[in-house]
Amino acid sequence: MKVAIQGELGSNSHMATLAMLGESKDLEIVACTLSAQVLAKVVSGEVDGAVLPIENSLHGSVAEHYDLLLELPVQIERESLLRIRHNVIVMPGVKLDAVQRVMSHPVALSQCRRFLAEHPEFEAVPFYDTAGSVKHLMAKGLRDVAGIAPELAAVEYGGEVLLAGVEDHAENYTRFHLVRREGIGPLDDELGSRTADKMSLAFAVEHRPGTLVAALERLARAGVNLTKIESRPVPGSPWEYVFYVDVRFGDAAQAEAALVALREHCRMLKVLGRYRAA
């Protein structure tokens, strides 16, 4: 099975893929630079699926991924939660007093502010990817540079974890989705066959007072539990929005009732996926 991710091998997306699909010699991870490239490979059939982050417990939603889920013929098949741990990784044998620069993705750097404040001697350098920072310093033989990345990046590129768990908040989680092309059957394994109890939807309502409230009331009357709501602007229509919601439901009949109620009210509705909640 081939699965695409945004970012380098050793990244959190790589770790989330292993958590959802297991470590197997038959699993091939395809690293991509951009999220749009990831899903283009899914749509074309070049890969069997993709694992993408959709929301972080500290930094909120990944807006671009909501847009791509709506635009493209793909569906969410699974979700998982990954505890995010940031580690200072260096070339083997390098000591902390030799480090002058610390590189990582800007979001990772912002989640390690306390550590960086305790070490004002370090120059914090934004980089395109967490694992990519370790790949870069190892390839270039940089002994005065550290990367902040998952432990898997050290394993992948031969680095050494100098300090583990330098993130500001221990309760730091990212929610990931396994996304596959529309129209293909679910993965045939024990996890994939578990009964769905969660649904992600995108809908748009007429731009007049009360229409969003009415949509949410219809969901409530259907008996589903709204667990998340997000809005994204409609391109070319200033101040109009598409609403993304996650709902939990007890059985398939309840989910269908919610969809029927929304279809009667909304000018657009897309089911982004039904899956088992993490």
Image: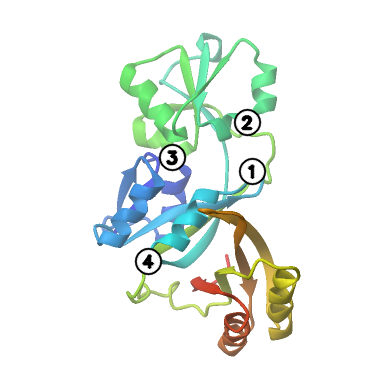
Residue at 56% from the left image edge and 34% from the top image edge = 108
Q: Nearer the viewer, mark 2 or mark 4?
A: 4
Neighbor class of circle 3 (other Cα within 10 Å; few <14, some 14-19, many 20+) is some
Q: Is residue 74 above or below residue 169?
A: below
- Give the alpha-carbon distance from disc 1 to disc 4, as whole Å: 27 Å
Disc number at residue 59? 1
The residue that disc 3 covers is 152
- Give the alpha-carbon distance from disc 4 to disc 3, as whole Å: 32 Å
Q: Is residue 257 left or right of residue 270?
A: right
Residue at 35% from the left image edge and 75% from the top image edge = 188
The residue that disc 4 covers is 73
Query: Do the residues bearing badges 1 and 2 touch, measured as CB atoms within 8 Å?
Result: yes
Residue at 42% from the left image edge and 13% from the top image edge = 143
Does residue 275 appear in the picture of this structure? no
Give the mark nearer the N terminus: 3 vs 2. 2
- Give the alpha-carbon distance from disc 1 to disc 2, as whole Å: 10 Å
Give the mark nearer the N terminus: 1 vs 4. 1
The residue that disc 2 covers is 110
Query: Do the residues bearing badges 4 and 3 touch, measured as CB atoms within 8 Å?
Result: no
Q: Could you say which quadrant of the image residue 239 lies in?
A: bottom right
Residue 161, percent across and down? 49, 28
